[in-house]
Amino acid sequence: MHDLLGGDVTATIAGEARLVTFTLDGHSYGVDVKAVQEVLRGQPRTRVPLAPPSLAGLINLRGQVLTAVDLREQLGLPPRGDDAPEPMLVVVRVDREPIALLVDRIGAVVDVHADSFEPPPDTLTGPARTLINGAYKLEDGLLLALDVERAVNS
Amino acid sequence: MNETDELDDIVQEFLIESHENLDQLDRDLVALEQEPGSRDLLASIFRTIHTIKGTSGFLAFGKLESLTHVGESLLARLRDGEMQMTPATTDVLLAMVDRVRELLTTIESSGAEGEVDVENLVTRITAVLEGRQEAPAPPAAKAPPKPRRKAPAKTPAKAPAPVAEPAAEPVVAHVAEPVVEPVVEPVVEEADEPVDESVIAPDLDEPAATLRLQPVSAAPEVATVRAVEAVAEPVAGDAPAKRGVADSSIRVDVDLLDTLMRLVGELVLTRNQIVRQASESAGADLTSAAQRLNLIASELQEGVMKTRMQPIDHLWSKLPRVVRDLGATCGKQVSLNMVGRETELDRSLLESVKDPLTHLVRNSVDHGLETPEARVAAGKPATGVLTLRAYHEGGQVVVEVSDDGAGINPARMAAKAVEKGLYTQAEVDRMSANDKLQLIFAPGLSTAAAVTNVSGRGVGMDVVRTNIEAIGGAVEIESVEGRGTTCRLRIPLTLAIVPALTVECAGDRYAIPQVSLLELVALDAERAASELEDVNGAPVYRLRGTLLPLVRLADVFDVESDRSDGHVLIAVLQAEGRRFGLVIDRVLNTEEIVVKPLTSQLKGLGTFSGATILGDGRVALILDVQSLARRALSAEALEPTGATVEEESRRTSETLSLLIAGIGGGRRVAIPLSSVTRLEQIPASSVEVVGSREVVQYRGAILPLLRLNGYLGAVSEREGDDLSVVVYSASGRSVAIVVDEIVDIVDEQAEVHSDIDDHGLLGSALIRDRIVEVLDVRGAILAADPKFYDEVEPQCTTFLEAM
């Protein structure tokens, strides 16, 4: 299944990588730290009628209007419960355009090694298949590496 | 100095622009010496000179024009590679730039070209042009080396009028300094105090130093004061205290304004938070400080926004004269129409549109419009019409220049391109007519048979496209041979401020551009219950007698309205020339909003034209009224405001709301409901006769009366003293159509057969198993009021186009 993965993945797994981690539905995910612009919390979001459910609204980032993408929707995870804490936002740059990813909770910046990387298992299907590059096997669990570009554009 | 005051705007603009251009030119020429073969540099120099030449032509600066014209010819040769740069060419070009500068300075100080001699130089340039060895230059013309060395050191804005500079009060610092210092010196020993001041002064606020000096030198130093004046005077020449044109305005980088704008946006948000918290924490000092902050921030915001926006009239106001002068030069009669003067453009856009627009106008008058004789021969009025139109459309500013001239022949365009060697015959043969038309934008192509002073060197359209595309815009050209040419500039609206109405629906806020908004109707629960009706399920409201189709925003967005008290708020909107009512939950405010482009993910939705950030920092979506209308209403359900009813009903197999009326003899006539304003019963005695026509007084106006039975050749069977009247209105004019009885209103998939070619009818339709004649409303109305559409139609057309 290696050939299904994009070239940028090879770059990631070639050596060391630094990822910004966050949790979604109890799982750990990570995106390349270079793609991340900043992390926000408690931003009021403006709902966009008629938009697909993954579009979690618009936010004002210092005068710039940003689209927020709900990663739970994108990854096919169950929606956040009503009593869940306010989601946090990871602002990433895709094609130089900033876009906000809605996550449950922000984690840390971790350094990972290519040795611990493994592509997703064949049993992983559904929308997440294309969005997850693979998993880093860390001591305290798996860290799933997310393809930011696809997560935003799919 | 008064002469300078009286220089009109055009000249002022010209001077500012030309000074800037000349600085650029200096740099380009110097650079050209380093790389003599650079086509880019030559093209840049050429355009600069071309622009100066063009404008000086309009402004009747003959010397300037003749000088730049010959210079331009030389540059054209160089650009096209027909001549090579030699020291001699560089010399004459530099001499030309110097002379142009000299002329401009003279114009600035005296308003005329004065005694500056150009003949000599024109002869020299011509000599170079004709390939003759340049005669040894007369000493007067040997000036070039000097400015050449000076030029790079100069800052762009500084160029104009070094003569007037010392007199300019606020900017004067560096000039004033040397003058001030020697004067201060003698005072030092006598009085300590003022000296301190004057020592500090230059650091703090240099211009002020001049003022503070006065008390110091009061009695004993009268002579010194006079000395100051004496020093100042000769420098300032005959225009003391008068600033140079270019000093009274500064050009600010638009990026800087962008940054300011963003910062101000941030400030406003922070202000809002502080104001909110101050009102909660009730400290009197904090509250008043917050209020001041509030005011200042608002004014700052307004100011910064204003720095960016200007009505296009700023450009247009100069054009009537340009057109008139140009028309006179070309021997053409031109009437200039301008529609949408108030359309506001971002300043940077305005700047970018300026040159292209001038080029287009020039082209239209010079090439587009024919001579009066040719026009008359072609059966057109002798006076050609040049129309400028500006409007906002789909998040863009559109500026159109159209003429009703001869149009462009695509074949000739293609032939020219081949002749100029830009394309091969084979390439051209493969092009569509439209592609051939687009060749007009190819560099180096001009269709004018002769190179005139006005245009025809093949730079115009090239420059237009370069400039417009540089700002991410597009140029379109449409032309119908014999009918005219329209050139359309589409300029992106990345930053525009539009007045908008903010409304609420299901707890979300939306902005509706005021341009689409006609009025607001608020109905309390009681009125809403009785006045909201439906036509076969389609909700309507009678707005002053006209049925207004209603669209519930909550339904469109598939959300739950949170208005439960039965009140109904209707925003009456206009889209594509038609009206409809948008039902919303609440009306919040009218405010100026900054339009932000939608992110790529949202563009596809089509319901929103952009987003904006409201006062509290939250994002609100801007409704795209046009697409909302298209989405929510079938084209026929919209109430037309123009006279397009006829076309509507002519289309077959479409759903129409029809008013069915009896006209006697068992005949039934269908009138498209959309054209009906009101149904009335009027006493027969109220009909009066004016001339040969029947009229009736109705709501303070006189309505022409049309008896439909008479018009359609039926016999009225109606008895009684009153008449059943259908009132039709468009753009403030109304006609009363008398029928026998109102039978029904149907919303039918009516198949209109246009096989009967009867007087006054469009055809027949089968409605509820009966044959009904469909009235030709337009024809009928013209029968009652032949002038009905005369004034109405042009307005409608303009309006529709403006949408």
Image (cartoon, coloured by chain):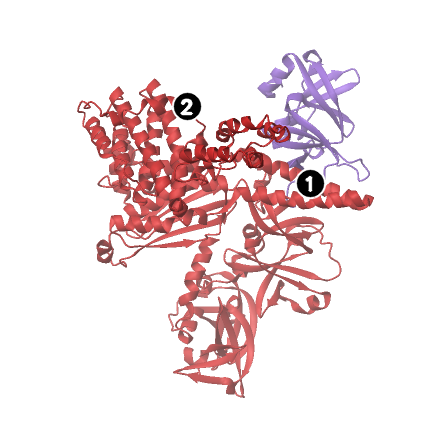
Place residue B84 in its image quadrant: top left
In the figure, B222 relative to B650: above or below? Answer: above
**Element type at marker 1?**
helix
Q: Is residue A29 left or right of residue B719?
A: right
Q: Is residue B264 left or right of residue B791?
A: right
In the figure, B171 relative to A138: above or below? Answer: below
Q: Identify which residue is drawn at 61% across, 16% down.
A: A10
Q: Identify which residue is drawn at 17% across, 24% down.
A: B132
Which subunit holds the residue at mark 2? Answer: B
Q: Identify which residue is drawn at 71% across, 43% down.
A: B272
Q: Are marks 2 and 1 on the same chain?
A: yes
Number of other residues with Cα within 10 Å of mark 2, as a class: few under 14, some 14 to 19, many 20 or more: some
Number of other residues with Cα within 10 Å of mark 1, as a class: few under 14, some 14 to 19, many 20 or more: many
User: What residue is disc 1 on?
Assistant: B269
The three-letter code of the residue at mark 2 reads Pro
Residue B468, given in percent of the width and then of the height, sits at 42, 38
Q: Nearer the viewer, residue B199 or B699?
A: B199
Residue B159, given in percent of the width and then of the height, sits at 41, 31
Q: Nearer the viewer, residue B62 or B372?
A: B62
Q: Nearer the viewer, residue B87 or B61?
A: B61
**Element type at marker 2?**
helix
Mark nearer the N terminus (2 vs 1): 2
Label for residue A4?
none
**Colour chain B is painted in:** red
The three-letter code of the residue at mark 1 reads Leu
User: What residue is disc 2 on?
Assistant: B152
Residue B601, given in percent of the width and then of the height, sits at 60, 37
Which subunit holds the residue at mark 1? Answer: B
**Colour chain A is painted in:** purple
User: What is the spatial separation of the Cα atoms under label 2 and label 1, in whole angstroms?
Assistant: 44 Å
